[in-house]
Amino acid sequence: MKRIFLLFSLSLFLACNTSAEKETQTNETIETEKAQDSVENFGIVIHGGAGTILKENMSDSLEQAYKAKLEEAIRTGHEILANGGTAIEAVQRTINIMENSPLFNAGKGAVFTNEGKNELDASIMEGKTLNAGAVSGVTTVKNPINLAWEVMENSEHVMLSGKGAEQFAKERNLEIVNPEYFYTENRFKSLERLKERNSEKTELDHDGKTAFVDPFIKDSKFGTVGCAALDKNGNLAAGTSTGGMTNKKWGRIGDAPIIGAGTYANNKTAAISATGWGEFFIRGVVAYDISAMMEYKGMSLAEAAKEVIQNKNPQLGGNGGIIAIDRNGNVSMEFNTAGMYRAKMNQDGDLEIGIYSE
């Protein structure tokens, strides 16, 4: 009887050990797969504005300047992600590069209002917590996207505007500049040309209302900049920054600082940044609409972006585009204009840069 009991005990011991070993191996396999997935699925995508951007109106030197700056910006964010940094940091630092360049309608290259001022808007959002921050109508903050981040992280609010936002920027020790810092001759001449035409409205590429006249390309475009990123931890983030419309009046604010219109991020779906005719992107809640179609209708990012940008928004009368990345690293760069400054990079470092409708 003792012998039978001993044999049973030995068999049970061996079975338990085998089970434990299998469980350990299974857990190790799962952890390895998770680690591999997290490394494989990071990526970043940016835009520098959409509109009537035609090859025949662009000099070779200017085209190369845009491509070089787009590459510099996206590589900055990609390096952060590759080194294990967060999506929110990658978005912020990438947008800083474009805000500091006079090529884009954000920060240093911002367009002028009817009063001859540069009024800046920005927003940022993270997909894990749905936390967000935004600012509008600031005139002395060098990098508005940094102020939007401060609002998100260090205030109980989502959006601050004007003098109050600038006071908060000082309290957070952000870099404050003289408004003259934002002056660029070509943007100021754009304002003068509009006033010479005795236009009370801005000019857009199809019906006499504009978002942003660029003398370099002899036509109209939207110059908002934006970025969306997915980090190795599976977290999404998006941000947008702009100088708004040339010749804008009455403190006009577009979609860029409006969470859900110009910027949205949700780990369940995607991170999105928009560029376009702001009034219509606000009315269509474009960025959120794309996310909602993915979450509630089960559409892919590509399907949702195409439906919103090629169908729903034009039906309202608006135009422009979006850049987005979903939780699996899939990217969309959808636009319904002649061009959109854009770039994307995946986990392998593959870089794609575009300007025209190709």
Image (spheres, rainbow, N blue to C red):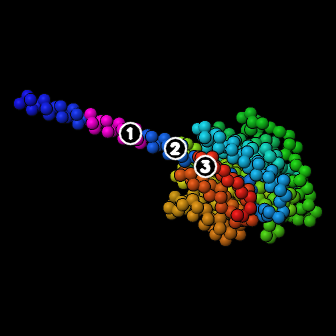
Q: Residue 346 carries which label?
A: 3
- Measure how far apart labels 2 and 1 are at the Cα level: 16 Å
Coordinates of residue 209 in the picture (x, y in percent): 81, 66
Q: Does the magenta stretch include residue 306?
A: no
Nearest to the observer: residue 59 or residue 93? 59
In the image, is 2 to the left or to the right of 69? left
Looking at the image, tell me whether mark 2 or mark 3 is earlier in sequence order: 2
In the image, is 64 to the left or to the right of 17? right
Coordinates of residue 140 in the picture (x, y in percent): 81, 42
Residue on which disc 2 sits = 38
Q: Does 109 appear above or below 56?
A: above
Rendered image quadrant of residue 11: top left
User: Can you see residue 13?
Assistant: yes
In the image, is 81 to the left or to the right of 214? left
Asked if disc 2 and disc 1 are in contact, CB closer than 8 Å, the reply is no
Which stretch is magenta? 17-30
Asked if disc 3 and disc 1 are in contact, CB closer than 8 Å, the reply is no
Coordinates of residue 43 in the picture (x, y in percent): 60, 48
